[in-house]
Image (cartoon, rainbow, N blue to C red):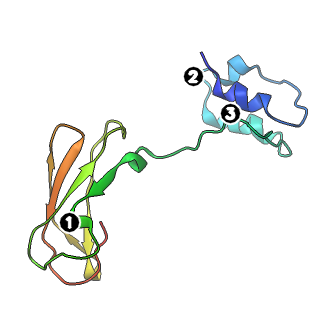
Amino acid sequence: MHCYITDILNFLTCTIIQVITPEEITNPNVDELSVMTYVSYFPEAKLKPGAPLRPRTHPSAKCSAKGPGVEPKGLVVKKPANFTVFTQGAGVGKLNVSVWGPGKTEEEVIVQDNQDHTYECQYFPQKQGNLNI
C-alpha cells in the first residue's frame, strides 16, 4: 500500500524528531485534527522539490455543463433554455441546479436524470439580463 503521508514526511527538509510513526499517522482511526496538530509542531518545515503533492479538488469540479442554456448569448425571454450537466467522475451524490436571474430571482429548473452521468436541464428565462447558473 502506498502511503501518501509518509511520502510528504520523507520530503521535509528540516530535522524532525519522530514522535509518531508513519503507521500511526496513516491509521484510519487517527483524525485529521491530530495529524494537523502534529504537523503544526514543525512550522519551519519546507517541502523539497519533487514532493508528491496532490491538489485537493471538490468532486463538483469534475462536473461541467454544455448547451445553449449556459451560453452567454442567444437566450430568449420565456423560451426554453436547455443544457446538459456531465457528472462522470464526480462521485455519488445529488445534483442541485440553480439559475438566478436579474434582481436575484431564482428561475425554476427542470432536471432529468439520464441514468448515464448526464442530466438534461431546462429553464425559461423570465427577464432580460445576466443569469447565474
Q: How many marks?
A: 3
- Up the image or down, 1 lies above or below 130; here it is above
Q: Which residue is mark 3?
A: 34
- Up the image or down, 117 lies above or below 27; here it is below
**Mark 3 crowdedness (10 Å alpha carbons): few <14, some 14-19, many ≥20:** few
| Mark drawn on residue 30 | none
Residue 39 location in percent, x, y? Answer: 76, 37
Could you tell me which residue is drawn at 87 percent across and 31 percent down? 16
Q: Earlier in the sequence, mark 1 or mark 3?
A: 3
Q: Which residue is mark 2?
A: 28
Query: Can you tell which of label 3 and label 2 is closer to the viewer?
Result: 2
Determine if residue 109 is in view.
no
- Splitting the image into 4 quarters, where does residue 116 fall? top left
* Mark 3 vs mark 2, CA separation in Å: 12 Å
Q: Earlier in the sequence, mark 3 or mark 2?
A: 2
In the drawing, does residue 38 fall left or right of residue 114? right
Query: Can you tell which of label 1 and label 3 is closer to the viewer?
Result: 1
| Mark drawn on residue 68 | 1
**Mark 2 crowdedness (10 Å alpha carbons): few <14, some 14-19, many ≥20:** few
* Mark 1 vs mark 3, CA separation in Å: 48 Å
Asked whether 107 or 24 is in front, the reply is 107
